[in-house]
Amino acid sequence: MRWLLGAPYARNGESMSSRLLGRQSAATVARRRTRHHVAAAVFAAGRLRLAAHRRAGAEVDLQSRVRTHLRAFSFEDLPPGGDVSSSDDGGQTLSPVNACDCRRLCLANHTCRGYGSSAGTASCRLTELLPAPGSTQASSGDWLWHARHGVRRLGERCAVDDDCSLLVAGATCAGGVCGCHGTVREDGTGGCRKAGNFTDVSGRQLASGLISETSVGSITACESACAALMSCVAFDFSAKQSRCRMYAEGITNEVNSTDNVKSFVWSFSRADGTPPASYQEVGDKWLRMLPSGDRLRAADICLRDGAILLPEVTRKGLEPLRSYIEGESTSTYIWIGMEDMLEEGRYVTSDGKEATDIAWDQGQPNAHDPDDCAVINRNMVIHDANCLNHQFNALCQYVGDNLALNRTSWLTMQDRRYPARHGNDGDERTFTHTTEGVRVPTAAWTVDLSQTVQVTSILYAGRVDCCGSTLAENRNRLTEVRVGSHPTAFNSTHLARCVWLEQPFVAKGYARLFRCTVPLTGRYVRLTRAKPLLDFAELAVFGNRLPSQP
């Protein structure tokens, strides 16, 4: 077995077991030395891991690393009566060694993933295999086995994410098993890799979170290096200088690049988040069938889940959902996320896209006003329907964690009756509002996401009780959402625009998802309106959390 700091018990030709077989005083000295070496190992292990991550260019979240570090120095007690007796477990049997010293020896060894001790024989066994219930063979002795936390590989049992992520970067614990979930996939070699692709952002400046600058021969080599590094979310390449720069942050400002480089930002395959248990995976979607109710209530429930009403309206996209819908629906029709409330005949889906290829049933749409919403039936075709006068099932599609939910927020000239926190409390029935009668050039609402995030989309919900149904009365216009790195300095060097919505973009009481032009990196999201009055029901933020720099 290899030892982290060499062989602390092998000195002057003596083996570890021979030293432990010595007199009581020698054993006492050995235990003291064990404690010394364990302490040294803990310190050295932390330094070695930190150095290794820095050499790889990885950002290190110190708090997370401390949690993981401590987790790896604790054990899970297995039921008594088992023994690991495989000859290929990479283990070592020592005698006489008591249980406490056996534990210390395992902690001092970076390859030890568990230990067993027998009080009757004063024996200690260290193993490189992870002891687990069912993996230990029945023993007539009094062996007690202990599995080390924090050093679990893919497919092995776990209790928390920190059990998995120390050995396998990006791995998380789901269903009690370590795996590559969410925005990562298995790489075929026992590790996880990022799932997604690069978006060309040439002309935009990458300036924050530089990981490394190296000389490479091609843009393909630079791209491959960034894709393989879990913490790399952007890179630029200079063909003239054969230079590859990798970054832990992407677009953070509105500054254009003056360098003759090609720049790319990583687009994750999906936003962070684990669908609630009520959702089922159907193809590439996570869906939930809601019980019968009105459309407004259905949209509110979806929002609370981090979801939107199903935006799919094409025949090709709806057909794979047939079996799920037939098995889950109880009503003739099902609410989906499409409507033409702002402009008759111009249908827009809940993810902000204008719908053109629509799976209309024969003779549909047929009612025009006030049938401004859409439903599907079990034949996977679409009808128009009155938005308010029907009780149908509804179909939610999961988007991700609402990263703004209940985070600290503030508002320009806040009305105490309608505080800023109502804009990100997850409830469409509440709303935030600036003080009436106080005129400012631009009203602004800001939320602190509490950590650096790559923002990919926002969901805006208008007030239910305001302000008339005509376009002229619609306040949801002249609205901009930006992502920034500073709580108050929202200038071009500290922020980047996600969306600009000039014309009325959502009807009162309804919600719509808008995707940023490119993924943006920042901690603060700011909504502004080029009017003295700002009011809305909810702003949800979706994207991917990024590790903090040390």
Image (cartoon, grey):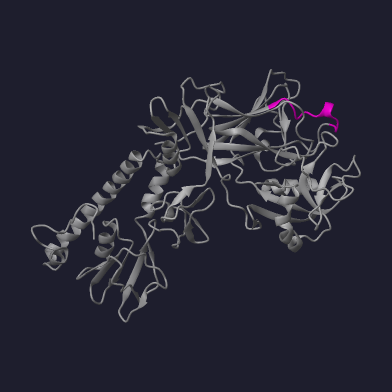
Q: In the figure, residue 283 lies in which quadrant?
A: bottom right
Most frequent secondary structure within the magenta stretch: loop
For image coordinates 72% across by 61% down, the residue present is 323
For image coordinates 36% across by 41% down, the residue present is 56
Asked whether residue 312 appears in the rendered view, the answer is yes
**Of 409 and 378, which appears nearest the observer?**
378
Q: In the figure, residue 34 lies in which quadrant?
A: bottom left
In magenta, the rendered stretch is 468-479
Residue 473 included in the magenta stretch of the image: yes
Residue 11 position in % (x across, y down): 11, 57
Left or right of 33 on screen, residue 142:
right
Left or right of 120 on screen, residue 24:
left
| In the image, farthest residue toward the left | 12
Residue 414 position in % (x across, y down): 68, 27
Residue 238 included in the magenta stretch of the image: no
**Of 448 and 3, which appears nearest the observer?**
3
Residue 484 position in % (x across, y down): 55, 29
| In the image, farthest residue toward the bottom | 140
For image coordinates 9% across by 60% down, the residue present is 13
Total numbered badges shown on the rendered structure: 0
**Of 416 and 518, which appears nearest the observer?**
518
Quadrant of the rendering where the C terminus is positioned: top left
Quadrant of the rendering where the N terminus is positioned: bottom left
Asked whether residue 294 appears in the rendered view, the answer is no
Residue 72 position in % (x across, y down): 36, 55
Left or right of 208 on screen, residue 20:
left
